[in-house]
Amino acid sequence: MAFELPKLAYEMDALAPVIDKKTMEYHYGKHHQAYVTNLNNLVKGTKFENASLEIIIREADGGIFNNGAQVWNHTFYFTSFSPEGGGEATSHLATAIKISFGSFGEFREQFSKAAATIFGSGWAWLVKHENGRLEIIQESNAGNPLRKGLTPILTCDVWEHAYYLEYQNRRPDYVKAFWEIIDWNVVGKRF
């Protein structure tokens, strides 16, 4: 089974000015595609050749894990957005956020801090534990919460290729703008 770059539900320039077209061309078109290509080359002839990305994340190591997790992470990230996004979580997710963090504002502040303070490259994640409790975690490099038995709800990519063309070294500015494009309908369904 060959992995493929998933199609976007929006045009490459649709998220501007938060994420501009040039960043999308590099981040989605080149980086995300490179992870897909690398993974397809790495899994040939291995026990992961016909495995799902979730199995690869849970069981693989080295290059297969890194590229498989990055394919999954980026797909999850890009499908969290809409040109009409923004606002706050609704329904059951909004209730869970309030229970876990006190308010949406407090959640947003804690998540933004987690994203802005990861040393080097990685991901900030909102995850759900088996008991329904929400938590914000940081993962370095290709880290993915599935490996820890957690359910991913939302992520922010803080590898420099996610923001550097538009924001240069101003990661906090990128994280602040990130909230304007989140599609809470999609994110809420993950809860």
Image (tube, helix red, strand yellow):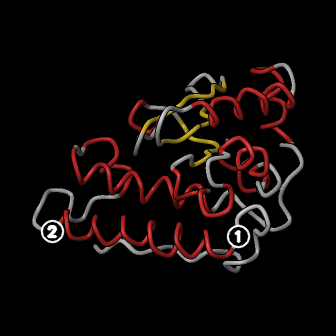
SS for tag 2? loop
Up/down of 140 relative to 103, above or below: below
Where in the figure is residue 26, as x and y percent of width and height?
Answer: 52, 71
Which residue is pictured at 71% across the width and 45% down the height?
A: 175
SS for tag 1? loop
Which residue is pictured at 87% across the width and 30% down the height?
A: 105
In the image, taking residue 45 as reference, residue 160 lies left or right, namely: right
Label 1 vs label 2, nearer the camera: 1
Looking at the image, which is closer to me, 27 or 37? 27
Q: Which residue is labeled 2 in the image?
A: 44
On the rendered image, what quadrant is the C terminus found in? top right
The dot on residue 124 is none
Where in the figure is residue 147, as x and y percent of width and height?
Answer: 38, 36
The residues bearing labels 1 and 2 have C-alpha atoms spaced at a distance of 35 Å
Looking at the image, which is closer to me, 41 or 13? 13
Snapshot quadrant of residue 113: top right
Which residue is pictured at 10% across the width and 66% down the height?
A: 45
The residue lying furthest to the left in this view is 45
Neighbour tally class for label 2: few under 14, some 14-19, many 20 plus, Cα within 10 Å: few
Which residue is pictured at 59% across the width and 37% down the height?
A: 125
Residue type for callout 2: Lys
Confirm or deny contact between disc 1 and disc 2 (CB under 8 A).
Answer: no
Looking at the image, which is closer to me, 24 or 93? 24
Mark closer to the chain start, 1 or 2: 1
Residue type for callout 1: Asp
Up/down of 76 relative to 4, above or below: above
Where in the figure is residue 35, as x and y percent of width and height?
Answer: 36, 64
Q: Which residue is labeled 1 in the image?
A: 20
